[in-house]
Image (spheres, grey):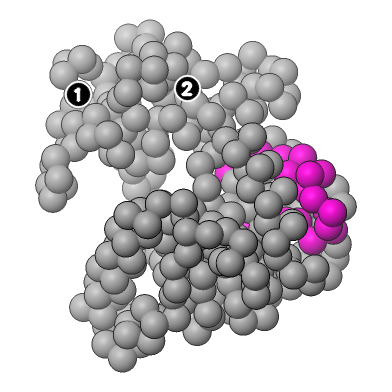
Amino acid sequence: MKNISVIGSGTMGNGIAHVFAQYGYTVSLIDISAEALQKALGVIEKNLERQVSKQIITTEAKAIALSNITTYTDLKAGVAKADLVVEAATENVELKLTIFREIDKAAPASCILATNTSSISITKIASVTQRPDKVIGMHFMNPVPVMKLVEVIRGYNTSDEVTSTVMNISKMLEKVPVEVNDYPGFVANRILMPMINEAIYALYEGVAGVQEIDTVMKLGMAHPMGPLQLADFIGLDVCLSILNVLYEGFGNPKYAPCPLLVNMVQAGHKGVKTGSGFYQYTAGSKDLIVAERFR
């Protein structure tokens, strides 16, 4: 397995491309936007340079990693020689189903089709392809070059051979793969998102303020980041999407998204990506300012 295609050049996509390229794989990075691809290459180069400055890799290794990446705006061309495709598009069911229909037609018959989805059913995604045994979840954590965990999610029809291959390739990237089964939210988000949602409810009901909630969880539970700051970092729109998947998948009211989260997303306050969520974010600054509406 040598040729890797990554679909989507956003935060997760460029991180996944970075890691595969760093470990010697030939990477095709695919996006419909040429501008987004150029931005992604800039991010990858910056992150590789950070690794050089920390003496994690050499300057030569950085150059080789960058040379391993080719960009495409045409999906068919980008997956034509792929041994493994990793889809990392927006967390939207219909979009992912459309992409997998296209990949299935364009990629070689032997190619494994993986999705970086954080909550959507692998079995549902596999159902729109002619190779459900070769469809699997490969859920990387953000930031991909730093975080060690990969959730490897088996769909109902995913074969043992494909699961073993993906577990092994994750180890080749010096990640720690954990095999889980295909239920809403898998493991990571089935546990994480209700906690974030409950923190938002605590704010919504006036139990405590933003900084107070985050401080309790950081100092009392040894979390490196409070749940409200983490929600901003993930993206409030992504949190809402995952909670809706959990709510619809289990039909249990405990997964219903907090009305405050719904309103914030509808108002365009999505966290770091928009510069405003539970905190305000200024480019180049590490200082967090509680958003004005929560003062």
When asked about the image quadrant of residue 1, the answer is bottom right
Identify the disc placed on residue 198. 2
Which residue is painted at 38% across and 8% down in the image? 205
Which residue is painted at 19% across and 31% down in the image? 280
Identify the disc placed on residue 291. 1
* For discs 1 and 2, the disc positioned in front in the rendered view: 1
Q: The C terminus is located in which quarter?
A: top left
Q: Which residues are magenta?
A: 118-138
Note whether residue 230 is visible: no
Q: Is residue 242 above or below residue 104?
A: above
**Would you say residue 144 sits in the magenta stretch?**
no
Q: Is residue 278 above or below residue 7?
A: above
Q: Tell me: 82 left or right of 282.
A: right
> Foreground: 211 or 28?
28
Q: Tell me: 24 left or right of 76.
A: left
Q: Position of residue 50 (x, y in %)?
A: 25, 71
Outermost residue, bottom side: 60
When asked about the image quadrant of residue 176, the answer is bottom right
When asked about the image quadrant of residue 172, the answer is bottom right
**Tag 2 or tag 1, which sits nearer the N-term?**
2
Which residue is painted at 27% across and 34% down in the image? 274
Identify the disc placed on residue 54. none
Which residue is painted at 74% across and 57% down in the image? 105
Packing grade of label 2 (10 A; few <14, some 14-19, many >=20) is: some
Q: Is residue 35 above or below residue 1?
A: above
Type of amino acid under label 2:
Glu
Q: Is residue 204 above or below residue 74?
A: above
Type of amino acid under label 1:
Ala
**Would you say residue 129 sits in the magenta stretch?**
yes
Q: Tell me: 115 left or right of 293.
A: right
What SS does tag 2 mark?
helix
